[in-house]
Amino acid sequence: MKFSMVGLSVIAMSIATLPAVGQVKREFVHERDLETGMLWQKQPAWAGEGLLGFYANDSAGPVIFSIDREGRKDEFLFTLKDAAKIRIYSVARSQKGEVALAGSAYTTDLRGATFVARIAPGFERQTVIRTWPYCPAVVALGEDGVLWAVGNLKNEDGTADVITGHLLRRYDPAGKMLSSKQIAIRDFQGAGDDATYLRASRDRVGWLTGPEYIEFALDGSETGRYPVPGATSYRDVAGLAMADDGNVVISCDRRDKYELLQLDREKGVWVRLVLPHSPPPWTVLGFDGTTLVGSTGNGRLSRFASK
């Protein structure tokens, strides 16, 4: 399939040993459950003040949805000029309500392009940035308005990867690329578009690759690496939640052994986290302030307040 310009409106390692188990630094108590009335096709994320996800993918108009703390739902039809088929790979939202997404689009004659997009709060205005031959798979929005993306780089005709799966790029609010850097990661394996997790908090961005969790300062510099115990593949992790106060919780699903792990920053290790009313495979979706939000995937959200 040949890739060329679609009618997009363009606006412009060192490897540590596996950590030992430390002491739990924070505990959570069950606050309440919330029925969303939705069975999502792809795992959403709690971002800003609500759940953010999408459905009707691989269509001329995928739907981006948001569900707030009280269960109120808002939806937005995402379309692009001349695009007959749009595939969204990842969505993210900032604390200010701006939405970012990564995807690809195709015309009826199978011309295509990859892109990242920014959607203003209230879904009132969108800016689309063509990125081909860069193929962003996951996105995040930093507190400073910078859009982060991780993906792979292909050759111009799309027949081969030049860089597979771990090229980090950052774009300013006007769409200008600020940096492009290949990130060396441990035990990387080629994966689908939903295999890794990129999240942003007030002062950092975190990337869960599977075997590792990597943190970056908002200027793009790497600040820390934390190997995930027992994880050897992207298939061994199932979710990432980052709080503005630095708390990080991940979901692991390793060969029928499911558990939650919390980062003990003082010791630089992961600790097991046991939550009440969270039967496996309960998966973390994000933090609402210091409240941990997750789900078993059946449309019910569970909230756990930090003690």
Image (cartoon, rainbow, N blue to C red):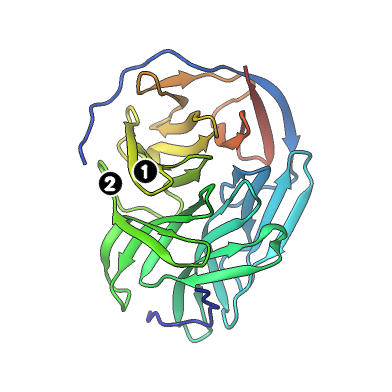
Residue 295 appears in the figure: no
Of 267 and 19, nearer the camera is 267
Residue type at numbered disc 2: Phe
Residue 119 falls left or right of residue 273: right
Residue plotted at (42% across, 20% down): 271
CB atoms of marks 1 and 2 within 8 Å:
yes
Q: Where is residue 206 in the image (x, y as percent from the top left)?
A: 43, 41
The quadrant of the rendering that contains the N terminus is bottom left
Q: Where is residue 58 in the image (x, y as percent from the top left)?
A: 56, 68
Query: Spatial distance from mark 1 to mark 2, Cα to Cα?
Result: 8 Å
Give the secondary structure at mark 1: loop
Residue type at numbered disc 1: Thr
In the depicted structure, whether residue 241 falls above or below residue 8: above
Residue plotted at (38% across, 32% down): 255
> Among all residues in the image, which is located at the extreme bottom?
109
Which of the two discs, 1 and 2, labels the residue nearer the N terminus?
2
Give the secondary structure at mark 2: loop
Q: Residue 94 — which label?
A: none
Residue at image mark 2: 188
